[in-house]
Image (tube, rainbow, N blue to C red):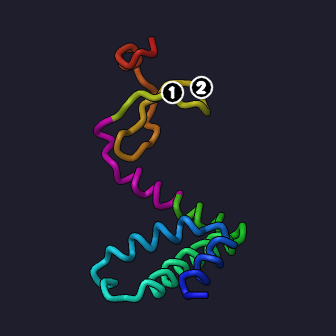
């Protein structure tokens, strides 16, 4: 079997064969890979995809919770730095009410007044 067949056989067993083919297409377009043998490009693409799959599936609950906490902190910093100059009136399902939501940072910035509700079609 050739290197490409071996790689694609492994990719098929993992269920990532289409993803590998797409990645090969991307890698072939890069100037730095212009003279790289096709078998090596398939190998590179498969290893990238395989590592990506393993990385995401190897995380435990604690790591995922830490990542969520970190992302929430980052979002909070972005929202606290935002000036909230533009907003849209949106219906918030959790509280079953329309509220002002910042267009830039997506933060709930308060209840809309009657004029805003009417202008937005809620009244």
Q: Position of residue 12 (x, y in %)?
A: 65, 71
Which sits in the foreground, 104 or 114?
104
**Quick check: 4 left or right of 106?**
right
Neighbour tally class for label 1: few under 14, some 14-19, many 20 plus, Cα within 10 Å:
some
Give 26 or 61, whichever is nearer the viewer.
26
In percent of width and height, residue 9 lies at: 64, 77
Q: Which residue is rendered at x = 58% and y = 66% of the image?
A: 67
Outermost right residue: 61
Q: Residue at x 45, y 11 (%)?
A: 123
Numbered label attached to residue 57: none
| Residue extent of the magenta highlight | 72-86
| Magenta residue check for 77 | yes
Give the residue pinned by disc 2.
Answer: 96
Rendered-image quadrant of the N terminus: bottom right
* Main SS category, magenta section: helix
Q: Are marks 2 and 1 in contact (CB under 8 Å)?
A: yes
Q: Which badge, 2 or 1, is on the more N-terminal residue?
A: 1
Q: Which residue matches tag 1?
A: 91
Q: Is residue 16 above or below residue 93?
A: below
Mark 2–mark 1 distance (CA, rounded to whole Å): 7 Å
Q: Position of residue 117 (x, y in %)?
A: 41, 18
Q: Quadrant of residue 64?
A: bottom right
- Helix, strand or loop under label 1: strand
Residue pictured at 43% horizontal, 84% vertical: 38
Query: Residue 25: which quarter of the image?
Result: bottom left
């Amino acid at each position: 079997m050739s290197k490409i067949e071996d790689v694609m056989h492994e990719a098929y067993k993992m269920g990532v064969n289409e993803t590998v083919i797409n990645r090969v297409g991307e890698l072939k377009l890069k100037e730095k890979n212009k003279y790289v043998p096709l078998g090596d490009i398939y190998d590179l693409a498969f290893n990238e995809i395989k590592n990506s799959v393993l990385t995401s599936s190897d995380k435990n609950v604690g790591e995922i919770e830490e990542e969520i906490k970190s992302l929430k902190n980052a979002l909070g910093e972005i929202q606290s730095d935002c000036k909230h100059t533009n907003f849209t009136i949106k219906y918030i399902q959790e509280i079953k009410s329309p509220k002002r939501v910042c267009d830039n940072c997506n933060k709930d910035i308060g209840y809309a007044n009657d004029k805003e509700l009417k202008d937005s079609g809620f009244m």
